[in-house]
Amino acid sequence: MKKLSTWLVLAVATAASHSVFAGDITGKITLKGTPPPPAQMKDVICGTPEKLTITSRQYDVGLADGLADVFVYLKSGTGIDGKTFTPPADKPVLDQLGCEYHPFSLAVMAGQKFEVRNSDPVLHNVNCSRAKINKGSNFAQATKGQVKEMSFDKMEVPILFKCDVHPWMTAYVAVFDNPFFAVTDKDGNYTIKNVPDGKYKMVVYHRKTHGNTDGEVKEIAVEAGGAKENFTLEVK
Amino acid sequence: MSRRLNAAGSFSKTSSVNPSEQNPLQGVHRLAWATAVATVFLLCVGGMVTSKGVGMSVPDWPNSYGYNMFLLPWNKWREGGVFWEHSHRLKGSLVGLLTLSLAVWLWFSKASPTLKKLGLVAFFGVIIQGVLGGFRVVFDAQIVGNTNLGAIFGVFHAAVAQLFLSLLAALVLMTSRLWRRLSSTSPTDVSALKKARGLVTVGTVLIFCQLLIGATMRHQHAGLAIPDFPLAYGQVWPDTSADAVAGYNRARISAVAFEDITPVQIVLQMVHRILAVGIATWIFACFVLIRRLFPKAHILRMFAGLWFGLILIQVSLGAATIWTGKAADVATAHMAVGALSLVTGALFALVSFQLILSSKSEKLPSSSMVDPALVLKA
């Protein structure tokens, strides 16, 4: 009976700590200005009789100027500094379908495993040898359904993945050293879950807008179970 | 009726061929031609590999996707970038075999020791070239400083390709009947020949420097560092400040070029443009001067005309490369005509040197003039 009550107290304390001391950061990233029109690759053949048109995805703008594919993450702060984090057990998938990568932007934690899959009936090579901090690689996936498990050890934002057989095929994989990160959806919305209350440095990075810089940094406070942070990026 | 080189170094029409002038190296000369032509095709396919950015579509070497290179099933390389990369490897093997045959044939032929040695140089050159191509693949994931080691090997691979083609072209010339006749000509105006030799040698070295810059630009796979021509980002000299370059990158949309451009790449392209103007001017001056110095139908006048024509085409292709957004076929044609310009310059210089040597060896016994390599040694 005593043991049970101890467990109950622990469970209540854990639940209380989550509701009082941690919450979600939500927000929207919008793009100000008109981006250059996308480039197109016409008459692409990808193992099927019909030809495809592939459109570049450097600026993917959705509803109310919401910008997709933006990495949003916490760089340092109360709930991060001096702590180590265990990578999540779930394995996101980077799929090759219709001679395009899905998703275009993938975020994982250092050490977290993710699957690279070929869902096309044609050969692809998966080339991430341009990684600057992690060890890059280049391997082939010759048959449909082939899967390779990958992970990166160190934080790096982002790593270019490309297929040289179909040179328009690219994706960006960002690796973080803590679990507080997100990628904006097609309308520019994001959610970073379960962030402990405190002060943080938040970073917003969009591959095309920020290029080889570290992105935009903002000091934020998470209080009373959450925060809302919107950003506006500019095309000059 | 055919055109033959007379004793003064000019071409004249003749209706008969003296049997004593038959070329004892005719067979090896034909093989040298075949090897040189195959190498031009190899260069073009290699150019397409780089222009399309598909060099890493076969990630392993010397195998291809784990297969012995020659046994890779057709259905694995019939499509996309792998077609160009694997074709390049197969054509490289063909050129390797042809070069080996050429070296062996030269070695056991009546060719001079110099030619035999050049055959060996070509053989070792093609091996080095193949290994450089392999290293470009194998070391692609290695970063030295901020530079990709594979890309550095790529630049060397491109440079050696140009030198190798020039060497093969020299072998074609030096195994030809024309070369034998050059050895037995008696040019009178040696000072004019020396002027021509100097001009042509400088022009050829400038072209090689230009090709190195071009290869460095191409192997960075950054697309067009400057998208407009004749201006650069709308200016005579583009702004290369960090803010300006960041702005260029934000506005730069391409379906295939993903790496951001850097100020160094912009400056490199500007140097390429300026040097192009310098080379075109130099070769035009060369063309004008040689027309003044040598009579009509002189072999050097013909070389000068061909060289100037190629440079005009090359400058046009350079502009077209930018105006088409670096279309793969146009960019490859630009690379190929650059290679032919280098080859023409190299042969032009070689002929100038040989004519000067012939004039110096006039007093030598006639037998030494029959063998051009002996004349070279003399």
Image (cartoon, coloured by chain):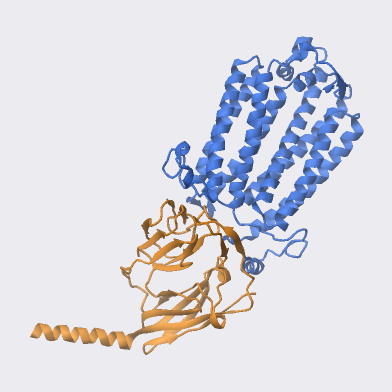
Q: Position of residue B185 (x, y in %)?
A: 83, 19
Q: Which quarter of the picture shows residue B14?
A: top right
Q: Is residue B216 above or below residue A5?
A: above
Q: Position of residue A64 (x, y in %)?
A: 56, 83
Q: Is residue B138 visible?
A: no
The picture's colour for chain A is: orange
Q: Position of residue A21 (x, y in %)?
A: 33, 86
Quadrant where the C terminus of chain B sits is top right
Q: Is residue A90 above or below residue B63?
A: below
Q: Is residue A22 above or below residue A40?
A: below
Quadrant where the N terminus of chain B sits is top right
Q: Which quarter of the picture shows residue B105?
A: top right
Q: Residue furthest front?
A: A49
Q: Residue at x 61, y 47 (%)?
A: B48
Q: Residue furthest bottom?
A: A224
Q: Position of residue B123 (x, y in %)?
A: 57, 28
Front residue of A118/A13: it is A118
Specify the chain shown as blue.
B
B10 sits to left or right of B244: right
Q: Is residue A39 visible?
A: yes
Q: Residue at x 73, y 58 (%)?
A: B323
